[in-house]
Every structure is written in structure tokens, then in C-alpha cells.
Amino acid sequence: MVKIEKIAAKNVYDPATYSQAIRVSGAQSVVFVSGQVAYDRKGGVAHAGDFKAQAREAFRSVVAQVKAAGGKPANIVKLNTYLTDVRYRADLIPIREAIFGKQLPASTLVGVTALAHPDWMIEVEAIAVI
């Protein structure tokens, strides 16, 4: 059975909004989820101009990919999140916590000048262990 534990070095600041490190033991599979964005049903941009809606959709897609592999949100151990404006960070935190609760994955947040389409505001990739 997979065991996922949050760890943090005692001499390194440990923020409440993500995990500094995750230790995994007993995993059978590792799932690498490509960057997920807010697609509409035809492959276009969903929720243009609405960061919160795009963030919810990107995370919904990440979770859906992990579920398709037989996992659940708790199996996600690493997130990389790309924002076109880092000022959206404050809006991102409650959306992430709604999915992961207090068991937050190790995370990296990067501000970028653009994503693959100029109307996408967020892209999220993940690693899960199952």
C-alpha cells in the first residue's frame, strides 16, 4: 500500500500553503500528468479572462487524469503551477485547498510571460503515486 508523508527539514521554513517535501513508499505506479489548462469541449479556451474558473478547470483536469490512472487527489505528490500573473497566487490557494485539504503536495509556482494560448492564465502539471 502506498504511504505518502509530508516531511520538512527542521532548519528550513515550512509554509502552510504547500509541502516542502513528500516521502513516498510502497507505490506501484508513478503517473506524470502533462500541463492541464482550461479547455472547452471543442479544445478551445474555456473561461477566458476568469482566473478562478480556469484554475478550477485545470485542477479538475489534473484530478481526472489521476483518477483515470486509478488514483485520487491524495495520490498527487508534486504540482508545478504556471501563472501568467503571479498576483493570482492569492486566488489560487483556496482552490488548491478545496481539492487537497491540508494534505498539500510538494509544489512549485512559476510566473511566466505566456502559455501556449494567450487566453490561458494557468497551467498545472502533476506527479502522482498509486
Image (tube, rainbow, N blue to C red):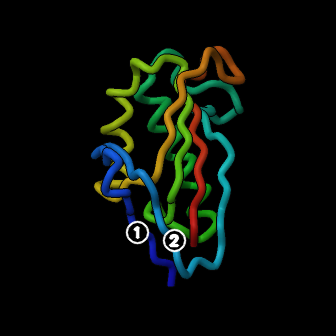
| Foreground of the two, 39 or 32 | 32
Q: Residue at x 65, y 14 (%)?
A: 118
Image position, residue 48 (x, y; %): 54, 18
The kind of residue tagged 2 is Val
Residue farthest along the front direction in this orientation: 11
Q: Residue at x 29, y 55 (%)?
A: 102
Image position, residue 111 (x, y; %): 54, 23
**Residue 81 disc label:** none
Q: Secondary structure at mark 1?
A: strand
| Foreground of the two, 52 or 77 | 77
Residue 88 picture quarter: top left
Distance between mark 2 and mark 1 Cα atoms: 7 Å
Q: Residue at x 58, y 50 (%)?
A: 126
Q: Secondary structure at mark 2?
A: strand
Q: Residue at x 67, y 56 (%)?
A: 32
Image position, residue 46 (x, y; %): 57, 27
Task: For the residues labelled 2 and 1, say whether their Cβ atoms are less than 8 Å apart.
Answer: yes
| Foreground of the two, 73 or 61 | 73
Residue holding disc 2? 24
The kind of residue tagged 1 is Glu
Q: Quadrant of the C terminus?
A: bottom right
Left or right for 125, reference 117: left
Q: Is residue 126 above or below residue 86?
A: below
- Which label's residue is closer to the chain start, 2 or 1? 1
Q: Residues within 10 Å of mark 1 (few under 14, many from 20)?
A: some
Image position, residue 29 (x, y; %): 65, 73
Residue holding disc 1? 5
Q: Is residue 63 above or below residue 93?
A: below
Q: Residues within 10 Å of mark 2 (few under 14, many from 20)?
A: some
